[in-house]
Image: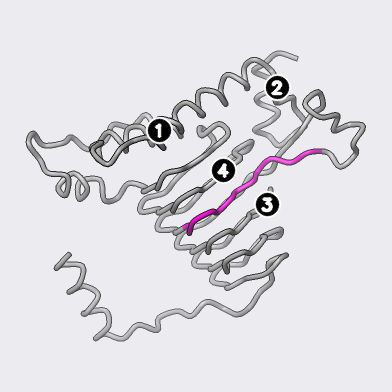
């Protein structure tokens, strides 16, 4: 089977072979990009870190132009709408990851992006979150270690989601907008919008509260933001 068709099968969620030269090379490229990002020192500029971050996911859009002589704080403000990923970060391919505006991913996130993994705007991931879009056949004779095929299903995390620490999201899951996933949960099924789930497997705990902030609290939040 030609490599390009094999890759297309993987993205469609069909059985494919992961250890072809094409896909091995793509994983190695991503590993090198992740290593460079994870080893970046504190003296590395925000712009360079964002460029390396974008190289992991294959985002070729130019960053906003940096003003000559600008400070680190000014650079950070300029890039404020970009996704923020704390190191270390690990992915299989990177190019199958889509990050919305204002996404925050905390330390030690792992993304197995066999299929598309989408994270919507303003979504927050706590430390040690794992997103696994890849899967293997249950039949061990078919599975056959590295010689057998594997497959996957896309993961979609919609806007304004909060995912607690040490959460695992399984293949094919959609987490609806505005939802919260409790720490340590294993999400095996879709989560409806504006729902709080927790547990292994994750189950509905309650509906997410909405419109609970008073006018005074909103004014205080704006004041704090303006003073930051």
Query: How dense is the environment of label 2, judged by Cα within 10 Å: few (below 14), some, or many (20 and up)?
Result: some
Q: Which mark is residue 170?
A: 3
Q: Which residues are magenta?
A: 125-136
Q: CA distance from mark 4 to mark 2?
A: 18 Å
Q: For the point 47% across and 26% down, which residue is it?
A: 32
Q: Badge 2 is on which residue? A: 19
* SS for dot 4: strand
User: Disc 1 designates what residue?
Assistant: 59
* Magenta-drawn stretch contains 126: yes
Q: Is residue 48 above or below residue 163?
A: above
Mark toward the start of the polypeptide (4 vs 2): 2
Name the residue beneath numbered marker 4: 111
Residue drawn at 70 percent across, 39 percent down: 152
Instruction: Give how far apart the Cα atoms at labels 1 and 3 are.
Output: 25 Å
- Where residue 99 sits: x, y (%)? 44, 45
Badge 3: residue crowd in 10 Å (few <14, some 14–19, many ≥20): many
Seen in the image, is 218 located left or right of residue 130? Answer: left
Contact between marks 4 and 3 (CB within 8 A): the answer is no
27 relative position to 121: left or right: right
The residue tagged with tag 3: helix, strand or loop?
A: loop
């Amino acid at each position: 089977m030609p490599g390009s068709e094999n890759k297309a099968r993987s993205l469609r969620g069909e059985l494919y072979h992961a250890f072809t030269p094409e896909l091995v090379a793509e994983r190695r490229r991503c590993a090198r990009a992740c290593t460079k990002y994870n080893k970046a020192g504190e003296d590395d500029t925000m712009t360079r870190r964002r460029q390396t971050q974008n190289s992991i996911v294959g985002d070729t859009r130019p960053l906003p132009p940096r003003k000559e002589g600008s400070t680190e704080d000014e650079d950070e403000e300029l890039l404020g709408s970009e996704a923020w990923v704390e190191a270390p970060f690990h992915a299989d391919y990177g190019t199958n990851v889509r990050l919305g505006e204002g996404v925050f991913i905390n330390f030690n996130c792992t993304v197995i992006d066999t299929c598309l993994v989408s994270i919507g705007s303003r979504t927050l991931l706590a430390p040690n979150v794992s997103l696994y879009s890849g899967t293997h056949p249950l039949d061990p004779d078919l599975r056959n270690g590295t010689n057998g095929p594997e497959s996957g299903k896309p993961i979609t995390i919609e806007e304004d989601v909060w995912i607690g620490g040490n959460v695992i999201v399984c293949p094919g899951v959609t987490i609806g907008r505005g939802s919260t996933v409790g720490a340590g949960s294993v999400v095996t099924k879709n989560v409806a919008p504006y729902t709080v789930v927790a547990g292994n497997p994750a189950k509905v705990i309650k509906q997410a509260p909405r419109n609970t902030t008073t006018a005074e609290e909103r004014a205080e939040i704006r004041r704090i933001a303006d003073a930051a």
